[in-house]
Image (spheres, grey):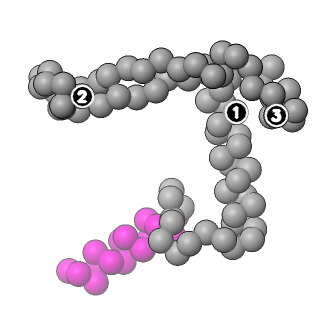
């Protein structure tokens, strides 16, 4: 079912809804200002988001259009962070 929307651009009606869930930021503090809201989507919708995101990143890396500041979860980011802390020490 996930491949059809990705190929045709059709979004199933269940993908257009999500469930908002409020979770604690800090254990034991139930103040409304200290809650974090997350959105839960259906499993197949999350899979589609993941697939689209990976394809977008492939194109961005191939065209070298990613800004230097936007490392994301790339290995270079971890190496850069480690080297920066080494220099600061």
Q: Earlier in the sequence, mark 2 or mark 3?
A: 3
Compared with 6, 82 (above or below) is below
| Residues marked 2 and 3 touching at CB (< 8 Å) | no
Mark 2 vs mark 3: give the one in front: 3
User: Mark number for residue 35?
Assistant: 2
> Main structural element of the magenta stretch: helix, strand or loop?
helix
Quadrant assignment, res 89: bottom left
Left or right, residue 86 beside residue 49: left
Chain part drawn in magenta = 75-89
Left or right, residue 25 beside residue 59: left
The residues tagged by marks 1 and 3 sit, at their Cα atoms, a distance apart of: 11 Å
> Would you call the spot at circle 3 few (<14 residues within 10 Å), some (14-19), or many (20 or more)?
few
Please report the residue visible at 42 percent of the width from the left and 74 percent of the height from the top.
Answer: 80
> Would you call the spot at circle 1 few (<14 residues within 10 Å), some (14-19), or many (20 or more)?
some
Expressed as whole percent of the image width and height from the top left, the position of residue 75 reads 52, 64
Q: Earlier in the sequence, mark 1 or mark 3?
A: 3
Please report the residue visible at 23 percent of the width from the left and 81 percent of the height from the top.
Answer: 88
Mark 1 vs mark 3: give the one in front: 3
The residues tagged by marks 2 and 3 sit, at their Cα atoms, a distance apart of: 35 Å
> Would you call the spot at circle 2 few (<14 residues within 10 Å), some (14-19), or many (20 or more)?
some
Please report the residue visible at 37 percent of the width from the left and 70 percent of the height from the top.
Answer: 81
Residue at mark 1: 48
Expressed as whole percent of the image width and height from the top left, the position of residue 10 reads 81, 28
Please report the residue visible at 65 percent of the width from the left and 37 percent of the height from the top.
Answer: 49
Image quadrant holding the N terminus, namely top right
Residue at mark 3: 9
């Amino acid at each position: 079912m996930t491949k059809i929307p990705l190929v045709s651009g059709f979004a199933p009606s269940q993908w257009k809804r999500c469930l908002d869930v409020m979770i604690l930021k800090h254990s034991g503090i139930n103040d409304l200002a200290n809650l974090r809201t997350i959105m839960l989507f259906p499993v197949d919708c999350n899979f589609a988001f993941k697939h689209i995101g990976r394809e977008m990143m492939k194109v961005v890396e191939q065209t070298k259009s990613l800004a230097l500041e936007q490392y994301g979860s790339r290995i270079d980011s971890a190496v850069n962070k480690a080297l920066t802390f080494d220099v600061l020490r």
